[in-house]
Amino acid sequence: MLTIKQEIKSYLARTGWTMTDLIKALNEKYNRNDSVQNLSNKLTRGTIKYKEVKEIADIIGAEIIWEF
């Protein structure tokens, strides 16, 4: 099973996004002043909020689907 960091980074790679580009887009769209290091730390520690994951999915054009 992939870690949260591995999973999100694999989605970024598949869609051609870099962490730097992602942070720029998130900061612009959600009026923040976040850094790549801050996001990387959240991913490493597994402390990223679900809301933030949904925002990342929105930026990269992905959809989170729960299947049963």
Image: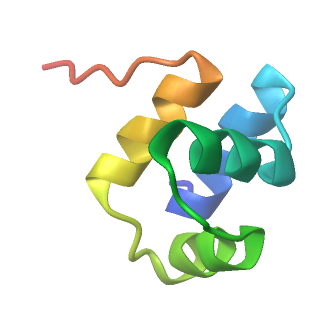
Q: Is residue 67 visible?
A: yes
Please tell me whether residue 66 is drawn above or below residue 1 in the rendered image: above
Question: Residue placed farthest to the left in the image?
Answer: 68
- Residue 2 relative to residue 48: left or right: right
Instruction: Assign the C terminus to one quadrant of the image.
Output: top left
- Residue 23 relative to residue 8: left or right: right
- Residue 32 relative to residue 54: left or right: right
Q: In terms of image quadrants, where is residue 12?
A: top right
Q: How is the image coloured?
A: rainbow
Q: Nearer the viewer, residue 20 or 28?
A: 28
The spot of residue 45 in percent (x, y) is: 50, 83
The spot of residue 27 in percent (x, y) is: 61, 51
Say how many tags the image has: 0
Please tell me whether residue 4 is drawn above or below residue 15 in the rendered image: below
**Residue sitting at x 67%, y 34%:** 11
Q: Is residue 3 visible?
A: no
**Residue sitting at x 86%, y 26%:** 16
The spot of residue 64 in percent (x, y) is: 35, 25
**Residue sitting at x 54%, y 36%:** 29
- Residue 22 relative to residue 2: left or right: right
Q: In terms of image quadrants, where is residue 61?
A: top right
**Residue sitting at x 73%, y 78%:** 37
